[in-house]
Image (spheres, grey):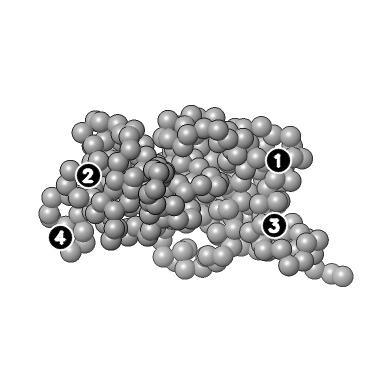
Amino acid sequence: MNGAPLSDLELARLEYPGTPDAQLVIELAQRTLDELAMEPPVSHKIIASMRDIDQIEETDLPWAGCLVRDGDRFVIKLRAADTRGKKRFTAFHEVKHTYMPGFALAPQYRCDPATPPDVARDRDPGLEALCDLGAVELLLPRRHFLNDLDGNTPTLTLASQLAERYDASLEATARRIVTLRPTPTLLIALEPSCTVSAPHDEPKLRVKRAYRNAGWPFIPPNKSVPPGSILTSPLSGEAVNEVSTLTGLTATPIGPVHISADLYPYTDDRGDQHMRVLALITPVSQPGQHNHAA
């Protein structure tokens, strides 16, 4: 039969018919790590080389990264302004494109909200989600990460230690904790900002992103934190590591919960600094009481 050879994902579909693509992508990532017998931190350069990618270069890009053909070579280009953790994630994302059908037919881009519309318009969201999933599995390998979580309390101190161990960003590592813990865990990223309708008002601490596993109520993005909330303490230099009840973020209070929160500023690719507060939250069970995250 003529035509291009089947991709790794297509072969996996034939080998395990009926298995969701997401699970196949996870298993393909683990197979790659097993073949190379790699331990954290996983080298994105070695993985890329294994997938016949000849070069990884950093340059001035309007998007996070791309995988392009240069003659008979494949090259990953990464946005030089991004942090090391973000560049490693993007590199793994581009590597995962080599597992997908038709990856060599056109340049592959990893886009973000700052990406030009003409590039973002041509993206396949389902394909990009699979590549993101595979990137996480390579950057923060499931088997090792679960072992590191076992018996440890989910705090930002633990997240910081694991971020260093896996050479990943703190927020990505904390999100991985939420994803893999079998018990309720919530991560909230907040920043002082104004609403679009009132751009000149005094900035308020607002929810930018919330990651949750089963059992948590929905927390709206851009929801402002009530004055005096424990979540505002890190803005004054006070780290939080205590049991409290969160009010004002949802229709009903969340609690009692253990809150680990601190200030983690970062600079974006435009050079703007963001005063980010991260909060890792777990429920606290009390005799005879049911909390909203149970």
**Real-space Cα separation, disc 2 to disc 1, in angstroms:** 44 Å
Q: Amino acid at mark 1?
A: Leu
Residue in front for this viewpoint, 90 or 157? 157
Q: What crowding class fits label 4: few (fewer than 14 Cα within 10 Å), some (14-19), or many (20 or more)?
A: few
**Real-space Cα separation, disc 2 to disc 4, in angstroms:** 22 Å
Location of residue 22 (image quadrant): bottom right
Q: Amino acid at mark 3?
A: Leu
Residue under numbered circle 1: 33
Measuring from the top left, give residue 23's x and y in whole percent. 66, 57
SS of the residue under disc 4: loop
Relative placement, left or right, of 142 versus 116 is right
Q: Amino acid at mark 2?
A: Ser
Residue under numbered circle 2: 229
Circles 1, 3 touching at the beta carbon (< 8 Å): no
Q: Earlier in the sequence, mark 1 or mark 4?
A: 1
Q: Residue furthest left?
A: 201
Location of residue 20 (image quadrant): bottom right
Q: Earlier in the sequence, mark 2 or mark 4?
A: 4
**Real-space Cα separation, disc 1 to disc 4, in angstroms:** 49 Å
